[in-house]
Structures are given as structure tokens and as C-alpha cells.
Image (spheres, grey):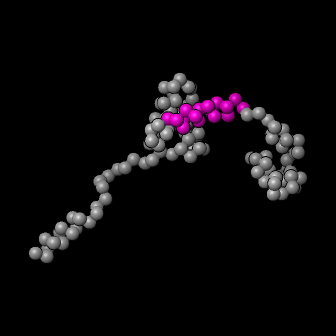
């Protein structure tokens, strides 16, 4: 987290100040900066493509459980919580289902007013 902060703000403040303020080493930051992505992050990127495709094909109505079913149907293995985490991190949130009766437009109130006046 500290290294990401330094990488984001190194154009604003001198890097040496950031190293001192956050108590990190210069060599540790540069090692973090040049490291290759982990196997999990590679797998997450591939999984995110399938998740996004399933979510968009459902017209943004599928939640994590239905998307997870689609991921499993494509032959990829992962857990439900992983799908939930990836959807949450990437802002893929299903539209809520409409429930209840339609809103009252006031037409019934107008009809009752007419009856009471007569």
C-alpha cells in the first residue's frame, strides 16, 4: 500500500521525502515497481474477462451467483467469493429488481374527488 502511494505521488513530491515519511527503503520500492504480476493476478485478469462478458450479456442484471454459474459452465474453476470480489472491485453491480405495484399517479384520487362533489 505504501509503495502504491509512492508510485502515485512521486510526480508531486520528491521520492526521497516519501521514502523517509513512509519509512520504506529505496531498493524495496524499486523491486516492487519492477516485479512481475503474480499467478493469481494473471488468473484474475482472465477470469474478469469472462465475468464481464457474462454480466454484460445479461444486460447488467446478473449478480455474483448467476455470473459464477456462467463461469463454471465455461469450464473455469473459481469460488463464489472470488467472483464477488472481482465484481465489487470493478464496479459490476447488478441493477435491482423492480418490486411492488406501480406508483400511484393520482388518477384514483381524482376520480374519488369527482364522486364526492356530485
- Residue sitting at x 52%, y 35%: 53
Q: Residue at x 83, y 57 (%)?
A: 13
The residue furthest left is 118
> Can you see residue 8?
yes
Report x, y in % for residue 3: 79, 46
Q: Please identify the dominant SS of the magenta region.
A: helix
Residue 96 locus on image (x, y percent):
43, 48
Residue at x 67% of width, y 31% of height = 42
Quarter of image, res 77:
top right
Residue beneath the point at 51% across and 25% down: 74
- Magenta stretch: includes residue 43: yes
Q: Can see residue 65?
A: no
Judge from the rendering whether residue 80 lies leftward or rightward of residue 23; answer left or right.
Answer: left
Q: Is residue 115 above or below residue 28?
A: below
Quadrant hosting residue 104: bottom left
Where's residue 17, x and y in %? 87, 55
In front of the other: 65 or 45: 45
Q: Quadrant of residue 49?
A: top right
Residue sitting farthest toward the bottom: 117
Magenta part of the chain: 38-54
Which of these two is toward me, 9 or 23? 9
How many marks the image carries: the answer is 0
Let me know if residue 103 is in the magenta part. no
In the image: residue 118, left or right of residue 84: left
Where residue 59 appears, x then y in whole percent? 45, 41
In the displayed structure, would residue 62 be above or below residue 102? above
Amino acid at each position: 500500500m505504501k509503495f502504491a502511494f509512492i508510485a502515485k505521488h512521486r510526480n508531486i513530491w520528491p521520492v526521497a521525502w516519501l521514502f523517509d515519511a513512509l519509512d520504506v527503503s529505496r531498493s524495496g520500492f524499486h523491486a516492487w515497481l519492477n516485479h512481475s504480476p503474480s499467478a493469481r493476478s494473471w488468473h484474475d485478469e482472465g477470469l474478469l474477462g469472462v465475468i464481464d462478458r457474462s454480466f454484460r450479456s445479461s444486460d447488467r442484471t446478473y449478480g455474483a451467483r448467476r455470473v459464477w454459474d456462467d463461469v463454471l459452465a465455461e469450464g473455469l474453476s473459481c469460488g463464489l467469493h472470488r467472483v464477488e470480489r472481482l465484481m465489487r472491485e470493478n464496479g459490476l453491480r447488478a441493477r435491482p429488481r423492480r418490486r411492488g405495484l406501480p406508483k400511484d399517479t393520482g388518477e384514483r384520487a381524482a376520480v374519488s374527488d369527482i364522486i364526492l362533489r356530485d
